[in-house]
Amino acid sequence: MNHKLTKTVCLLLLFSMNICLGQEENYKYGKDSERHDGVPKGTVTKHVFQSQIFEGTHREYYVYVPAQYSADQPAAIMVFQDGHAYVKEDGDFKVPIVFDNLIHQKEMPVTIGIFINPGHNAPELPANPFRASNRSWEYDELSNLYARFLIEEIIPEVGKKYNLTTDPRMRAICGLSSGGICAFTAAWERPDYFYRVLSHIGSFTNIRGGHAYPSMIRRHAKRDIKVYLQDGSGDLNNLYGNWWLANQQMASSLEFRDYDYTFVKGTGGHNGKHGGALFPDSLRWLWKE
């Protein structure tokens, strides 16, 4: 693996994300991103995993279990890449809080959340998981390897303790930036397994060939997937491509092939502010039949 290239990609994107923070609108969060009395609170546990598919990599992952979960009924699942960014209650997305509220309101099914950090090629993990050495290889590569990692390793590991759905329409996958294209790739490669896709500021650019997706969507057989895209006009523009234009191309191709999709546009940069403020409504759209 070209770890020097991977490190360069990660550092460039991190630097660009910091620049774009200054361009961000003041997006406001709604009541579904706040704690409320009387709403049952789910639990979050932290785990460490060593992959065989991505040999030599170590990572942390988190599992959210809603208070309404019962082993008698299979739970829906939603997988998050860069899980540390999504599982934080004081972060941009506040997923456990939003899940608690929407599951309580019956606006999404009883869902177990699996929040996975990218792999690192050493047991001692970096303080900032965005800097994990295997992140770009896992997320930006157009292959079935990451889908296999989820389907053959992580999800069965979680399934040892919890009763998980076998219905693709009850499985969702989500990510931001390179994690966003990773979520799409997993569903593209395995639409028989993942049906619902949520991409925040997705990197559909030429980091590792992701700029090919718009033409692939137009030319290849239509997948049975449902796709939510979010991006802002202040997103990255660098040697790998223009993120804002790339997401517009994705949306145009999905429309051309009559996919069940939506594209929510903003003016923000390469960060989770806009997607986080939208997150409750994006889940409503994603899980609505």
Image (spheres, rainbow, N blue to C red):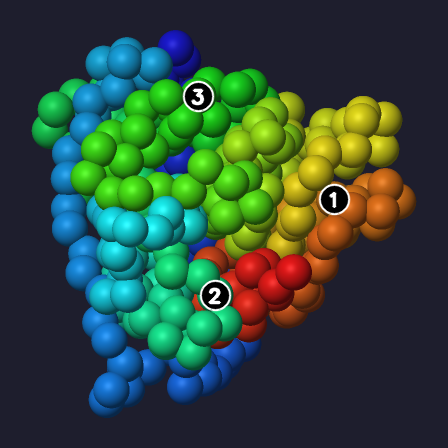
Look at 60% across and 25% down and name the residue there.
189
Residue at the image position 55 percent from the left and 51 percent from the top: 198
Toward the bottom, the furthest residue is 37
Percent position of residue 182, x then y: 51, 35
- The residue pinned by badge 1 equals 250
Residue at x-position 64% and y-position 68%: 266
Q: Please state which of the two labelled residues, at mark 2 or mark 3, is closer to the viewer.
A: 2
Q: Is residue 167 above or below residue 33?
A: above
User: Tag 2's secondary structure?
Assistant: loop
Chain-order first, disc 1 or disc 3: 3
Q: Earlier in the sequence, mark 2 or mark 3?
A: 2
Q: Nearer the viewer, residue 97 or 71?
A: 71
Name the foreground residue: 48 vs 221. Answer: 221
Q: Quadrant of residue 69?
A: bottom left
Instruction: Give left or right: position of 271 versus 225.
Output: left
Which residue position holds label 3?
A: 148
The amino acid type, in three-letter code, at marker 3 is Arg
Q: What amino acid is at disc 1?
A: Met
x, y percent for residue 268 = 57, 66
